[in-house]
Amino acid sequence: MSGTTRRYLRPAAALAAAAALTLTGCTADSSSSDGRTGFISDPNGGLDTAPLASRQTAPAISGITLRGDKAALADYRGKVVVLNVWGSWCNPCRAEAKGLQEVWSKYQAQDVQFLGINTRDSDVNSAIRFEDSFGITYPSLYDPDATEILKFPKGSLNPQSIPTTIVVDRQGRLAARSMRPISAEDLEKLIQPVLAEPK
């Protein structure tokens, strides 16, 4: 395989994976436990949690935000981090946006950091308009080809649909996940136990 072919194959594969991620959004099954990784799924709420002993380390997510700043998950080690995977084209993302901002406003002074991962928006301005329309004040990485999303290991509390919300504990481990539009109430249910863990 030539160097030119390799250069074009990798972005194509990333775009195909991003498309697959979107298509599984309404069909991903989050109603069963996964014995391999030890995370527990709520059959009624679609919320997954991982006990301390079963948590996997979150990948090294980093990049440039929608506003042009550098950001990395590692910057927030020692805080509980809420990662939200979203796109401006995604109607369920619109449904949850107000609640996400509400919870961010409530918890940002309590060792909690929110970080969005915007994906499949070919025009960054579309994503910025989305943030502005919902009054979103936490940063979001611009990840149009899902490069950062694909860093999550399979079999972990990884994003398998859009939107997905993931809670990362203070030690940088994947602690909880929702693979559907999340309400403010359910998001607090995911954050509070992780926040209450010993530092």
Image (cartoon, rainbow, N blue to C red):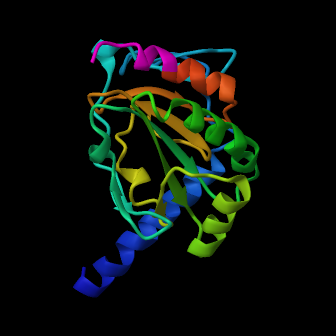
The reply, left or right, for residue 120 in relation to residue 39 is: right
Residue 45 in the image: above or below residue 142: above
Tally of numbered discs = 0
Residue plotted at (32% across, 17% down): 54
Is residue 143 among what the camera can see?
yes
Query: In this orientation, which residue lies closer to the viewer: 88 or 2?
Result: 88
Indicate yes or no whether the magenta region holds residue 197: yes
Query: In this orientation, which residue lies closer to the viewer: 159 or 88?
Result: 88
Q: Residue 154 at what x, y percent from top left?
A: 38, 38
Query: In this orientation, which residue lies closer to the viewer: 83 or 71?
Result: 71
Residue 194 in the image: above or below residue 156: above
Q: Residue 28 at what x, y percent from top left?
A: 62, 36
Task: Work out which quarter of the rendered image holds the C terminus and state it.
Answer: top left
Q: Residue furthest front?
A: 109
User: What are the residue bounds of the magenta stretch?
Assistant: 192-199
Residue plotted at (37% across, 80% down): 8
The reply, left or right, for residue 36 in relation to residue 87 is: left
Residue plotted at (34% across, 50% down): 151
The reply, left or right, for residue 59 in relation to residue 175 is: left
Q: Residue 14 at what x, y percent from top left?
A: 43, 64
Which picture quadrant has residue 110?
top left
Q: Residue 198 at what x, y percent from top left?
A: 29, 12
Residue 199 in the image: above or below residue 152: above
Task: Work out which quarter of the rendered image holds the N terminus and state it.
Answer: bottom left
Residue plotted at (42% across, 20% down): 195
Is residue 59 among what the camera can see?
no
Indicate yes or no whether the magenta region holds residue 145: no
